[in-house]
Amino acid sequence: MRDSRRAITLIILTFNEEKHIERCIKNAQAVASEVFLVDCCSTDRTRAIAEGLGAKVVDHAWPGNHAAQLNWALENLPITTPWVMRLDADEYLTDELAAEINAVLPTMSSEMSGVYFKRRVYFMGRWIKHGGYYPTFLLRLWRHKKVVCEQRWMDEHMKVVEGTSVTLDHDFVDDNLNYLPWWTAKHNGYSSREAVELLNHEHHFMQADVLGNGGDGSQEKTKRKLKENYYSRLPLFLRALIYWKYRYFLKLGFLDGVPGLIWHFLQGFWYRFLVDAKIYQVERYAKDRGVSMKEAIKEVLGIEL
């Protein structure tokens, strides 16, 4: 059987990831022959650690969102392998998934362009199994040139532009080792981008990219449909409370213990409430000043569209 490691290039988008990058690269080398970091001006030891492990580091200024950075990487990196895989620096493959990739990839038909993995999230050392959060299916392995990233400010997904897709049986792990102040700062940034997406859904001031027809993306399409057609129509602030209660009680998030209480409250309520607060302020600014939504977003959120 052919060694799949000669067929996969891994792409990691990084900024100050010295805490995670060694774990990610060493783990991925079980399936990938080449690793590229697209780094956005890291000031820590990220580059040195990565290059010491044989990875190639390419500097590229942050273009404003993950989708633009990843699509730049896909268009500009000297990728020579037939397959490309994407991981965040704080993610890694389980041994079972690595073995499955090595066994299955050489048998893939030419029509198969995308491969979905199941994501397993750890928070404060606890696997978040409940609250509707596991499993989450994400397209993380694909044939080069057959898949692109949606151009969105938030909630972007990979989309198959040619061929179909399949879902593997085993998990990859999202396990960030930073502490809560880092997590809340990151999600504060995410909330601004999420606000832009929901404002655009309501006011239509820029074109929204859509998912492709890869065949195995039903979960992500269903979630987006629920958010855009139902959640977005609920009153601001109340919808965050309803969503948290749904996750924590109906979807049994309370079974995830104290880390789950913190996770589901912060990620399911606080984050969504913060998004709504930013939407409220942007819309109020636009109305009071008589300016466009793009101008209001630039002033209130500091995002230039």
Image: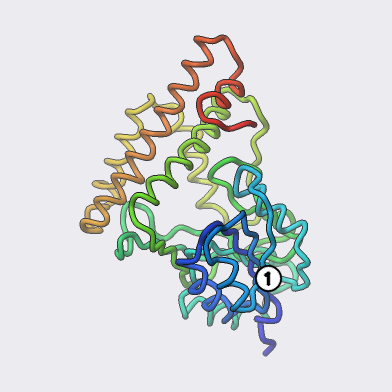
Q: Quadrant of residue 105?
A: bottom right
Q: Residue at x 65, y 60 (%)?
A: 38
Expressed as whole percent of the image width and height from the top left, the position of residue 292 reads 61, 17
Q: Is 292 above or below relative to 302?
A: above
| Side of 37 relative to 132 (left or right) | right
| Side of 42 relative to 69 (left or right) | left
| Side of 178 relative to 106 (left or right) | left
Q: Quadrant of the N terminus?
A: bottom right
Q: Quadrant of the C terminus?
A: top right
Q: Quadrant of residue 31?
A: bottom right
Q: How many marks?
A: 1
The residue pinned by badge 1 equals 56
Expressed as whole percent of the image width and height from the top left, the position of residue 204 reads 62, 25
Depth check, front residue: 188 or 267: 188
Expressed as whole percent of the image width and height from the top left, the position of residue 152 reads 61, 41
Visual colour scheme: rainbow
Q: Is 11 above or below relative to 131?
A: below
Q: Secondary structure at mark 1?
A: strand
Amino acid residing under circle 1: Lys
Q: Residue at x 27, y 52 (%)?
A: 253
Q: Is 249 above or below relative to 25?
A: above
Expressed as whole percent of the image width and height from the top left, the position of residue 181 reads 35, 49
Q: Residue at x 50, y 52 (%)?
A: 219
